[in-house]
Each structure stands twice: as C-alpha cells, then as structure tokens.
Amino acid sequence: MLSDVLPHLSRLSLLFQKQSIDVTLLETVVSSTIITINQLLTNEGQHTQNIDQYIEEYLSAHDIVVSQHKKDKFKSEVYSKYTAGVCTNLEDRFPDISLISAFSIFDPSTVNGVGNEEKVETLAEHYNLDAEQTSREYDLIKVAMENTYHDKSYQDMMKIIITSYKDLTPNLYKLAAIALTIPVSTADCERGFSVVSRIKTKLRNRLSEKIIKILLFISTEGPDIQDFNFSAAAANWASAKERRIHI
C-alpha cells in the first residue's frame, strides 16, 4: 500500500537534507526513485501483496468483510493513482535536474568522466556564455584538477576557481559562482527555521521582522558564543556616551 512508496521518498529526502550535496548523484538518484516507484504500478510492493493478511488481522476482529471488488477498487482508485501522482510530482519538481547535475564538471573525482564536454556546452548555452571559450577554459581547469587539485572536493574546487582563476577562466568563474548559490540542499532552510523558533519565543513574540533578521544572521553566521568577549563588549558599552542602539 502507501508504505511501499514512502521508503523511496524518504531516501530521496535524506539526500537533500545533507549540508553538502554531491551533484553527481542527483540525476541518478532522482531518476532511479521515479523508476522504482513507477514499477510499483505493475509489480506490487510487499505491503500491497499482503493486503489480504492485513485485512484479516485488523478488520475481521470487528466483523468487517471486504469483498474482492472493494480490494481491486482500492488498488485502482487509491494505490495506483497515488503512486502515479507521486511520479508525476517528482518529474515536475525536478525539471532542471540535468542542468544542476551538469555542474559536476567541477568535481575533480569525475574530471575524466564521460560526457563532461557535453555538460560544459549545456551550461554555457543555458547561461548565455561563449561555448567555445568556456570549453577552452575547462581544458585548463581539467589539467589543474588532474595534477594539483585531485584531492579537493566539489565545493572546494569551485571556491578555488573563484579565488584563483577568475582572470584565467572568467566563464567558469561565473558558473562556479552560480553553482555555489543554487539552493539545492534543504539543510540551511531547516537550520534557519530552528534558529527562528529559538529566537522568537512566547516571551519575545513582539520582535519585529528586522530585528529577527539581524538576530538570525548573528546566530547562523556569527562566531561561537565561546569566542565572544563579553567583558570587552560590556566595557565598550559602559564607555559609550550614547548607549541606545538605533536599528
């Protein structure tokens, strides 16, 4: 039944909850999830196959009789429609999955992977860059990844391009900057929700949106509380003539 579908969605969800997502896995995992769930329409899962057993355990004790016609109707009008709807929603949810996966060209571990040249062309075309120049730039970075940065991660490599190769590879610089700002992971969003819940308590429910935004930024991007010099802050505040902070 529905329990046959949920484990596959759960595994897909866990991928997007990671702080750093391996984009080389995105298209494969999403596609395999859709295919696996779609196969449940013809090859019923374990829970659906055992529907008679569940009915016997949970309904017969209450003298409820379920005919074969009702079982078939449930499968066609509930189970099949739900399963097909999940596949459709996944396809609609990830229309640009191939484009995002193309950013795997920055992963040193896949520098010799098949199709990297096509991925470079795809990115250049989508973001209106010179495809030929971008390809030449990638040839340069490809050699650097093979010889110097082979042990770097996907995100570290993009940061290296932004800081050290901006002038040599301007097009790849733009692509790396775009890739670093694409919100693929849900980890930061969930972290932000948790921080807001901690800041805006029942006793502080009148905080303005502006103050909450400032406190949220300090909490998520500021230094650890152990590194904050409270004595220096108190002395600085005590020595100030104007102690009211205008925000």
Image (cartoon, rainbow, N blue to C red):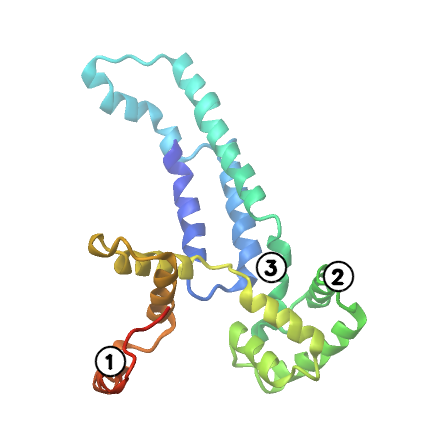
Q: Reading the chain from its start, which is encountered first: label 2 or label 3?
A: 3
In the rendered image, which quarter contains the N terminus? top left
Of 186 and 237, the residue lying toward us: 237
Nearer the camera: disc 2 or disc 1: 1
Q: Position of residue 181 (x, y in %)?
A: 54, 66
Q: Reading the chain from its start, which is encountered first: label 3 or label 1?
A: 3
At a point 19% along the width and 18% down the height, the residue shown is 61
Cα gap from disc 3 to disc 1, whole angstroms: 38 Å
In the rendered image, which quarter contains the C terminus? bottom left
Relative to 226, is 176 on the left or the right?
right
Q: Position of residue 220 (x, y in %)?
A: 36, 68
Under mark 2, the amino acid is Glu
Cα gap from disc 2 to disc 1, whole angstroms: 48 Å
Residue under pointer 2: 125
Under mark 3, the amino acid is Ile
Residue under pointer 3: 100
At a point 78% along the width and 68% down the height, the residue shown is 131
Residue under pointer 1: 226
